[in-house]
Image: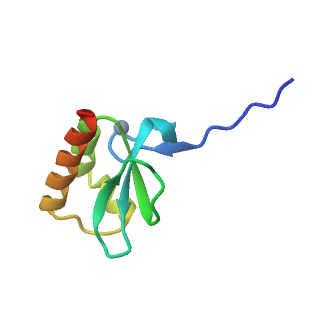
Amino acid sequence: MAAVRKIPMRKCVGCGEMKSKKEMLRVLKTEDGQVILDATGRKNGRGAYLCFDRECLKKAVRNKGLERSLKMEIPQTVYEHLEKEFEDIENT
Ligand SMILES: [Zn+2]
């Protein structure tokens, strides 16, 4: 029998579902403490994962999953910024 290739799974901080990394969006805390969306998944820093779904971002705001995962307080302005970035990604 052929070995089953393991797909790295990540948990969405919004809905809590496990999905493969490719299906998810990485939210990254940079070294200087900024929180950004990392569409390429290649930048360094502490990351959290979200489904490609703005509902999950909203859920992550409500349940503070993103804050827990990044171990920092996230101001409302950052969430607004993330939501805008989400829109940009959706529109490309
Ligand atoms: Zn999700």
Q: How is the image coloured?
A: rainbow
Question: Residue at coordinates 68% horizontally, 38% vertically from top-left?
Answer: 6
Q: Position of residue 30 (x, y in %)?
A: 36, 68
Q: Is residue 37 left or right of residue 20?
A: left
Residue 17 in sight from this viewpoint: no
Residue 57 placement (x, y as % from top left): 26, 44
Q: Quadrant of ligand 1?
A: top left
Residue 56 image position (x, y, % from top left) = 29, 39
> Residue 27, relative to residue 30: is it above or below?
above
Q: In which quadrant is the C terminus drawn? A: top left
In the picture as drawn, the residue positioned furthest to the bottom comes out as 32
Q: In the displayed structure, does residue 63 sit left or right of residue 4?
A: left
Q: Nearer the viewer, residue 89 or 9?
A: 89
**In the image as oriented, which residue stretches furthest toward the front?**
92
Location of residue 79 (image quadrant) = bottom left
Residue 22 place in picture, x, y as percent: 49, 38
Residue 58 showing in the rendered view: yes
- Number of numbered discs on residues: 0
> Which residue is at 12% across, 60% downward?
77
Q: Relative to the observer, which residue lies in front, 83 or 73? A: 83
Q: Residue furthest top?
A: 1
**Position of 62 compared to 2: left or right?**
left
* Quadrant including the N terminus: top right
